[in-house]
Image (tube, coloured by chain):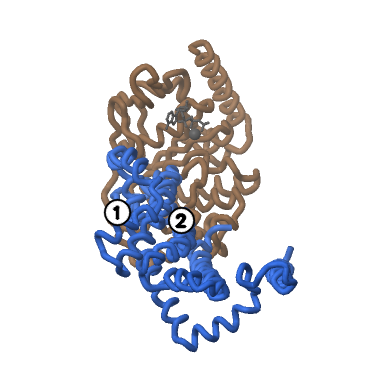
Amino acid sequence: MAKVIETEDLSVAFGEGDGQNIIFRHLNISVEAGEFVTLVGVSGAGKSTLLRVIADLIPPYEGSVKIDTPQDRARRRIAMVFQSANLMPWRKIGDNVGLGLEGIEVSPEQCRERVRSTLDLVGLGDFSDRWPYQLSGGQRQRVGIARALAVDPDILLMDEPFGALDAITRIALQDELLRIWRETKKSVLFVTHDIEEAVYLGDRVLLLGDRPAHIVNEYKIDIARSQRREGENFMRKVEEVKAGLVDAMALSDGAA
Amino acid sequence: MNTAHRYALSVTGLVGFLVFWEAISQSGWISTTLLPPPSSIAPSLVSEIQEGIWHWMVWASFRHYAIGFFIGSFLGVTLGVLVALFPKVEASQAWLARVLRPIPPLAWIPFAIIWFGISETAAAFIISIGIFWINYFTAMAAVQAVDKDLIEVARAFGHRTFPALLKKVILPGAAPGILSGLRAGLGQGWMTVVAAELFGIEGIGQRMMEASGLLATDVVILYMFSIALLYGISDYIFVSIQNKILAWQR
Ligand SMILES: Nc1ncnc2c1ncn2[C@@H]1O[C@H](COP(=O)(O)OP(=O)(O)OP(=O)(O)O)[C@@H](O)[C@H]1O
Ligand SMILES: [Mg+2]
């Protein structure tokens, strides 16, 4: 399988000189075409930062990120769902969803259609003409998801996209995301705090920890997705990842 | 407090003020030359209009004001935005602005006359100075305060060139600040109009000087009210436009 994301000895640091803060060092991770990878780690480990370098929003300090996806002028290669929705308050909801469609080769009709269908998908089909301030936090977060899906990216980077949602909406959107992923063969890198969510969604779970961060552990989830909400194997896997996270926290505390 | 209630209170406040003033004037405690009653405004207005003075002066002042407002606002906003966007420009203006800023617009009068003569240009120049500084600093602050996360979002969705970021994030994000600067300039401009005309440029200010020389204080008051009216109208129009542009704010 081809790798769509590959980091090579990737390091990221903020600041310079004495105040320099190295977030992670010599990180080597990869995501294969069509793979669903989840990323867990304690708060402040550098998960959002990793997504940012991959999306080319901040530069690497050392090493590199390789993105290998086909070029298609009617789509974008990478789209990101941010940890906080970050909608543009001066754009109506529909125009927020259309943000990434401006500047790529889609006709106005296609554009409207994509905005409409992705808003329907996140259950906000009637909200196209509202202003962001008229939405709840969870609704805004869903608009952020629609905005990323609208550009039909090959790679979907998702930073705790379901964090602000109630359990029922969250489960529905998880399954919706899995369906889209299966049908469109996207590659997904998905950050979450919720270990059950990580094990439920991922083909692989990466555990980012320690300081500077690196991948302290990696879990392959070879349980059929239909067996994942509960069941012996699923629960065991969740416990295993949880134990790994606790170890990783002990590790960073020791280092600090 | 609903809109009607608010409206009623505002009217009561203004009318109450006028009645109080009229009463003091009529009581005879103070000579009507020192304090002409508000009821004298209407007759003075009629006579000024009959003599063809009022609309002539108001129109002249409005011209100075409009030209000064547009030039001062345009330069202030443009330079303020540029300074905020380019750190090197910001650094190079930091001390220069501190030197020039505290000079009041009226202190420029001698130079305005030397450079432009006793002319409309001179009045517009003086008016534009105060407006320039207000817009310069508010536009700079507004751009600096634009949410960096939204710039990141725009970049993540493929808008990475400077013009694209300017159009999609920086200007809309700075719009509330820029508009409030323009509005402050709108008021500041009327305050300098009169002063800019005191030295002989035709307009409300000149007419007020003339009238006060003749102790025609009722005429002075008439023009004071005329300025208030002009400001009220321009501010009202501005706020309605502003509300349309900023409909996205709660
Ligand atoms: N722009 C920045 N400048 C300086 N330090 C930063 C910056 N952004 C993040 N950091 C630091 O980098 C570290 C990792 O931050 P990051 O946001 O990637 O964490 P995270 O794993 O996503 O945490 P969370 O789960 O809480 O979202 C933190 O210690 C943070 O303080
Ligand atoms: Mg984060």
Q: Earlier in the sequence, mark 2 or mark 1?
A: 1
Q: Is residue B7 left or right of residue A97?
A: right
* Percent x, y of residue B70: 36, 65
Residue A32 drawn above or below residue B116: above
Work out which residue is located at the far bottom of the displayed protein and give it. B50
Element assignment for label 1 = helix
The front one of A43 and B203 is: B203
Camera-near label (2 vs 1) is: 2
Work out which residue is located at the far left of the displayed protein and give it. B115
What residue is pinned by disc 1? B163
Give the class, few, some or many, for how many residues have Cα within 10 Å of label 1's Cα (few <14, many ≥20).
Answer: few
The front one of B175 and A101 is: B175
Instruction: Read off the chain for label 1.
Output: B
Residue B247 visible, this angle: yes
* Percent x, y of residue B173: 44, 52
Which numbered dot is residue B181? 2
Element assignment for label 2 = helix
Q: Is residue B127 left or right of residue B239?
A: left
Mark 2 and mark 1: Cα distance apart in space? 23 Å
Q: Residue at x 31, y 58 (%)?
A: A103
Chain letter for the part of the structure drawn in blue? B
The front one of A214 and B179 is: B179
Residue type indicated by callout 1 = Pro
Q: Residue at x 43, y 38 (%)?
A: A189
Chain A colour is brown
* Percent x, y of residue B99: 34, 41
Quadrant occupied by the C terminus of chain B = bottom right
Residue A139 drawn above or below residue A194: below
